[in-house]
Amino acid sequence: MSTIKVTREAPIATVQLDRPAVLNALSEELMDELVASLETLDADAEIRCIVLTGNDKAFAAGADIKKSFVDATPVSMLEEDLTTRWERVRKIRKPIIAAVSGYCLGGGCELAMTCDIIVASETAQFGQPEVNLGIIPGAGGTQRLTRAVGKYRAMEIILTGRRVQADEAKAIGLVAQVYPAASWLEDAKALARTIAEKPPIAVRLATEAIDLAQSSTLDAGLEFERKAFYLLFSTEDKKEGVDAFMNKRKAVFKGK
Ligand code: COA
């Protein structure tokens, strides 16, 4: 049975986590299907932006505690290497918007943080509750949350395992926008369509440059940015964008 639903509405696509009975707990099977569907969309020339979502009640309530943790040993964890799937999500080149409603906990929060933008319904609740199970986040939570909100807030959130409501998540920089509960997914798709209209090569290089700001030194990031900026002057989309500005018309970008 599929654990993922993919809807193509070119130039955007929506990938929905679909294990509602267990609040979209991230089983191995789900993560494999998720990575495969994202990699397929990444190779699809008609798709320019991806929305990753769950349902009203849950984006995802974390790793599947029943399937993955009950009898796990260090060796079985090493052999399954479940968390490497999160790194494959990070390598998708098209922008991914995590559209979060309801629970976004543990591995769910780490999955959202692996995406490029997080937007939320006003009902969203984020958290890294692993400490309550006697463990710690294992798919990037200690690193990405700290880079997103700073050491002292990340420390308090991870050491208490408490929930962070949508408004607080926005205030601390984890979430870009909070949308009404009645329209959150449509609002997230509208954001995806806006990004999909932008020049894809510029979007890709901007994404890579911003990611470098998280993982590299300022000098290395500035060097990459400068080279990427120069490179874009060779694209047809740069000519189109400047020409559209000069002639007071709307630009149509082709990704060339
Ligand atoms: N793994 C496996 N199953 C999970 C799950 C998870 N991470 N989170 C929820 N479920 C299951 C529940 O066991 C329950 O199944 P059941 O009906 O067979 O008993 C079902 O999803 C609904 O969850 P329930 O706890 O009844 O819903 P709730 O609204 O009362 O509480 C949560 C929701 C998210 C607060 C609660 O389910 C929870 O704390 N989940 C674990 C969160 C967590 O620790 N995540 C980090 C894992 S590393």
Image (cartoon, rainbow, N blue to C red):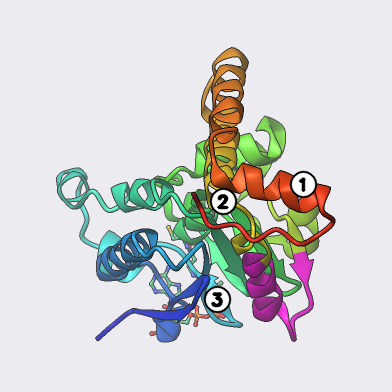
Residue 223: image quadrant is top right
Pointer 2 residue: 116
In the rendered structure, find residue 108 and report the number of the disc placed on it.
none
Q: Residue at x 37, y 65 (%)?
A: 44
Q: From the image, give the main secondary structure of the stretch colored magenta.
A: helix
Is 178 rendered above or below residue 213?
below
Q: Distance between the Cα atoms at labels 3 and 1?
A: 21 Å
Amino acid identity at mark 2: Asp
User: Which residue occupies the foreground of this view, 10 or 161?
Assistant: 10
Q: Position of residue 180 (x, y in %)?
A: 79, 78
User: Which residue occupies the foreground of this view, 94 or 45?
Assistant: 45
Q: Position of residue 195 (x, y in %)?
A: 64, 59
Q: Which residues are magenta?
A: 178-193
- Farthest residue to the right: give it: 248
CA neighbours of label 3 inside 10 A, class few (<14), some (14 to 19), many (20+): many
140 lies left or right of 70: right
